[in-house]
Amino acid sequence: MDLSFSEEQEMLWKSARDFLANKCPKTLVRQMEEDAKGYVPQLWKEMADLGWIGLPFPEKYGGGGFSFLDLVVLLEEMGRACLPGPFLSTVVLGGLPILEWGTEEQKQNILPKICKGNAILTLALTEPSARYDAASIQVKATTEGDNYVISGTKLFVHDAHIADYIIVVARTAKRADPEKGITLFIVDGKSPGISTFVLRTMAGDKQCELTMDKVRVPKANILGKVNQGWGMVKKIIEWAALAKSAEMMGGAQQVLEMTIQYAKERVQFDRPIGSFQIIQHYLADMSIDVDSSRVSLHKAAWMLSEGIPCTKEISVIKGWISEAYRRVAAQAHQIHGAIGFTKDHDLELYFRRAKAGELFFGDADFHREIVAQQLGL
Amino acid sequence: MDFRFTEEEEAFHKEVQAFIAEAVPPDWLGVDPGPEEESREEVYPLAVEMWHKFGAKGWIGLTWPKEYGGQGASLWKEMALLQELAYRGVPGMDLAIAQADLLLNFGTEEQKRRFIPPITRGEVKWAIGMSEPNAGSDTFAVQLKAAEEGDCFVLNGQKIWSSGAHHAKYQVVYARTDPNKQLGLSVFIVDLESPGITMRQITQMTGIPAFCEVFFDNVRVPRENLLGEKNGGWQILLHAFGAERTYGLFIIYNTKRYLEQLVQYCQETEVNGQPLAKDPLIRNRLAQLAIEIEVGLNLGHELNWMATRGISTVKASSQIKVHGAAVAQRLANLGQQILGLYGPLNEDSKWVKLGGRLRHTYLSAVAFSMAGGTSETSRNHIAGRFGLGLPRK
């Protein structure tokens, strides 16, 4: 057993932390919450040049050929910096499914664009039921000659308003088992009939209502096999949950560190509040949440990278950190007092993101159910 | 990064599993780690038998030097063994292990040669004489006096909460040799059959008489039984705290066994025409406990790794202790909820479920956040200079 980072991973997180500290100040984070696009194209390009966007894709498509664990190392730093933008959507929700199930032609066409920073992707999965189950997939795709025609509404689609390609999860056959008859399509984000509306949310992330009115998609754009899409969706949910856990990890770590710092500096009753046992014990409990999350995150990411089945381990970390990060952020507020409750303080950025992250691709209840299945219940 | 065990580790793990499968009855539900449950009449003979068997296998003091009967093995091997024993609830690993660790670090050559080999052979049991009525978490408040008289020290005073002392041959006694609170403690190896010692067993909330109160009335301890320097006990005391580092992890392995028993119970027990396992509330709660156990075990992997690399484990071990005790208590409570009215039944009832283990641990787990350092003390360690670096004042 060796739980240390490789030299490459050390370099990756250090350079990511420096770069983001420099290029992604909190002023930018706040600005992007209000921005229509929600990301800075110039910064996106620079990230592509650094090889970040192509990180997990093979070199032959212009990527870096790194593992999911390496990606997790980078995502932790992005979460620490509250980096706005469509990184997770493009790389994890869009790029990885194409790499895993795309035809060679689909891969040749799209992956190099992703790696170069020339294509933004996302996944249109959830609908107004707001749940991650198969029965919720009601948007229909019907055949018409060489095309499928898709109509219906997807909701809470991250970054759809700027997406060049949207992987749409649609129902292509009605079966007794709701998990059957689902197909994934790679849809051009600029196709006629597509309209997006950005929802205003607590964390200022760009979740969209995506309306599709008779959107025509060539059969060549089917991702994977017709009517067998749900198995793919389950995998994507796992990847997304793990990637989001990594972002949350970075956020939780940052919150813990800034709160320890604050407790050392803030003087009340003629002594730093961090010298009071109650504050020390709050922070001790926060550190348990943070440190147990980190090793559990790395274990799941390592297993995924090694090709070891890790459905349970992914749900363990997402089920755990969903609540741990919220506890850490809430306790951090209590320790900071009024100053942390102000809009000018960084802490509120993390508190809002902790909740958004919790709900993204399965909250703790969702993942506890998966763990229950894995226990044989 | 690599979470895999080596082939050697896997092989040893299998060896331990095979040993356990033969050594305990097939329907063995397990006991909590530590000396407490060994004080049950029906468990003690098995504990003694296992202690001998561990000795014969060379599993006591795996990491100790060969000259004292150890195996000179690396730390992971010992951790793998102790963790598997805790997971399967096998009794017998004695507190003597941690005491021998003190002897190895602070003992004279003569003490090591005299006291350690009988431990490695699984022949004698040891107890700890640390707590007193007025020295609980404030360990340095020890009052038991040791007065120097010729080639002896004469001990007067009392120890309390000494688990399993009634079965032990020796007790490591922390005594006062100088009024200076921190720099006035000395440590003695005391033969519990010495004249002047009386002992009283105290029954714990579980119904098991595992605690001992030990009274010292002019007990003469030969000078050669002084461990370390006179007034140098503080070093030994701090080292002893460090040696408790894996207790929290044992608690989590122990809890994992209870969880698995509950899962099986829920699969096999029907309520309203369907297995309890199908009840969404029960699924959710059991899964939450499983997650809490899993992240605790992951912290344990990190702890083991840090220990083998010589990285300070003060913070990690204290985190595991706090987490493990809390998880064990939640599991115990959930177990009672799931068993419902069957939960509180005594072990000997013909109606009892899961051997009454959930009744036992509902009570025993209360002590997990106290034994081996309270959760509050552990949080102090996490926050302090070996952890988060928060100021003392």
Image: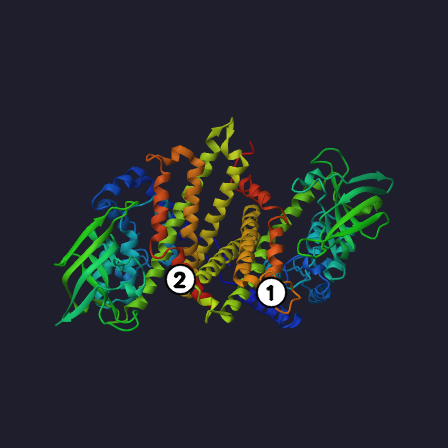
Q: Nearer the viewer, mark 1 or mark 2?
A: 1
Residue A129 seen in the figure: yes
Residue A258 seen in the figure: no
| Foreground pick, B337 / B77 | B337
Q: Residue furthest top?
A: A270
Q: x, y percentage for residue A157?
A: 25, 55
Report whether A133 appears left or right of B188.
left
Q: x, y percentage for residue B334?
A: 52, 58
**Numbered circles on residues, count:** 2
Q: Amino acid at mark 1?
A: Arg
The residue labelled by disc 2 is A304
Chain ID of residue with mark 2: A
Q: Quadrant of residue B54?
A: bottom right
Q: x, y percentage for residue A259?
A: 44, 38
Q: Quadrant of residue B59?
A: bottom right
Chain ID of residue with mark 1: B
- Disc on res. B373: none
